[in-house]
Amino acid sequence: MRDSRRNSRNTPRRSSRTTTSSNQPPRRVPQSQSGMQRTGARSRRAIRERQRKKQRRRLLSRICIAVLVLLAVIFAPTIFFQVSTIDVSGDTRYKSEELIKSTGVKEGDNMFFLDTKQIAEDLKKEYPYLDTVKLHRKMPSTLQIEVTDRTEALSLEQNGKYFVLDLTGKVLEEKKSAAKNTATVTGISTKGLEVGNTIDENKQDKIASVIKLLELADAYDMKAHIKTIDVEKAYDVRITYDKQYTILLGALEESNIEHKIQFLKAILKEPSLPDTGVIDLTDEKEARYRPTEDTTEDVVVDEKALEEAAGDTKTDSTDSTDSSDEKQGTTSDSSDSTTSSDSSEQNAETSSSSTENADSNASDSSGKTSSDKTSSDSGTDTESSSNSSSDAAID
C-alpha cells in the first residue's frame, strides 16, 4: 500500500514535468557550476550569521559593562567613602565638640550624601557669633569644617541689660554688662530685639545711624577710641572719645556723618588741644573745642582743616584764638565804661535830691549843674572807652 500511495502521488508530478518538457526543452546546467552556486550561497549565509552573533555579543558586553559601572557608582561611595574623621578649624569661641555634635554627622555616614549647605545654615542659626561656615570633603573619609566668628561692635544698654551687635546689625548676645572693646550705646529701645536676628534699618533708624557712624569711624581708624554713644535726643547725639573728650555731633544724618568724622579727625590734630574738653561738631562749616561744656571761649577750626587732615598736617588756629581774645577784651572794656557812667549818674541824682530839700531854686540850679557834670563825666568815660578799644585794635 505504501508503494501504491507513493506512486499515486508522484504520478501527477511526472505528468506535469512531461507536459512542461513537451512544451520547452529542459535547461541543462553543468553540474560543476550548480555546485559552486550552492556553495557560495551557503558561505554568504554563514558570514551573515557570524556577523549577527558578533553584534549580539557586543551588545551584551556593553550592557554588562554599563550595569557594572552603575553598580559601582551606587555602591562604591557607600562602601569606600564613609565619614571617619571630622575636623574643625578657624578662630571661634565655640568648642569643636559642640559644633561637631550640632552638625548631626556621625561616623560611618556617606560623605556624598551630606547636605553641606543645610548643615552650614543650621550651625549659623544655632551659634549667632558664627560668620562663615564652610564644609569640605577630604577623600577618602575626612570632613573638614572651617568657621570664622563675627566681631562685636556695640552694646545697646537699657534697664541694665546689654544687647551685643556687630556692624551688620545682627544681635549676637544678651549680657548683664557691656562687651569688651565695644561702644556702649544708650537712648535706644531694645524692644523686639532677639539673639540671632538682624535689625530692620527702616524700623530702627537710630541703630542704623549708630552703625553707620561706627563703620566710618573704623574706616578712619577711630572706632577703638569711641567708648560711649548717647542718642537719647536725636538732635543732640554725643560720644565719648577715649574718656577724654565729649563730642557733640548734633543730629546724625546719612549725608553728614562722614563730614563730622573728618572734622573730628582734623581737630584732634590741633597742637593746642587740651587733654580734656568738649569738641563741638554741630556746625557743618566749622568745628569748636573748649575745656568744659559751660565755657564760652571756643577755638574754631574751619573747613580748610579738612584738607590739612587729609594730608596729615596740623592746623594752626592762633589767628582765630587772638581774634576771639580781642573781641572779648573790647567787650569787657565797654562793659566797664558803662558801669562807671551808671555809677556817676546815681551819685548825681543823690546830690540833686539833697539840694532840693534845702531850697527849690537852688535845687534847680544844682540839678542843672549836676546833670551837666554827669554828662561831661559820661562823655569823658565814653572817650576813654573808645580810646581803650582803639588801643586794643591797634595791638
Image: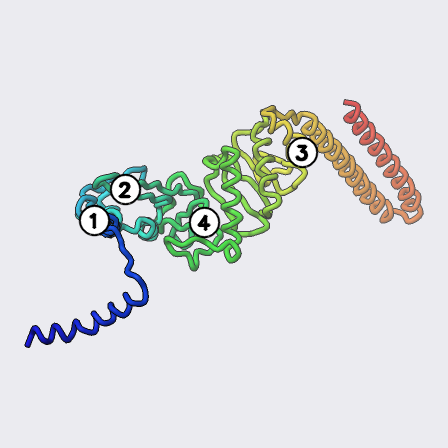
Q: Is residue 13 left or right of residue 371?
A: left
Q: Earlier in the sequence, mark 4 or mark 1?
A: 1
**Residue that numbered label 2 is attached to:** 137
The answer to which of 145 and 297 lies nearer the viewer is 145
* Circle 3 SS class: loop
Looking at marks 3 and 4 on the same chain, the residue that comes earlier in the sequence is marked by 4
Give the mark nearer the N terminus: 2 vs 4: 2
Residue with the mark numbered 4 = 169
Answer with left or right where residue 271 lies relative to residue 127: right
Q: Earlier in the sequence, mark 2 or mark 1?
A: 1
Comparing labels 3 and 2, the label whose residue is closer to the camera: 2
Whole-number angstrom distance, CA of label 2 to CA of label 4: 32 Å
- Front-most of 243 and 69? 69
The amino acid type, in three-letter code, at marker 2 is Arg
Residues at circles 3 and 2 in contact by the CB criterion of under 8 Å: no
Residue, disc 1: 68
- Which residue lies most toward the left here? 1
Q: How far is the residue under mark 3 from the one under mark 2?
A: 57 Å
368, 308: nearer the viewer: 308
Q: Which residue is mark 3?
A: 303
Residue 221 at what x, y percent from top left? Answer: 50, 33
The amino acid at mark 1 is: Leu
Quadrant location of residue 297?
top right
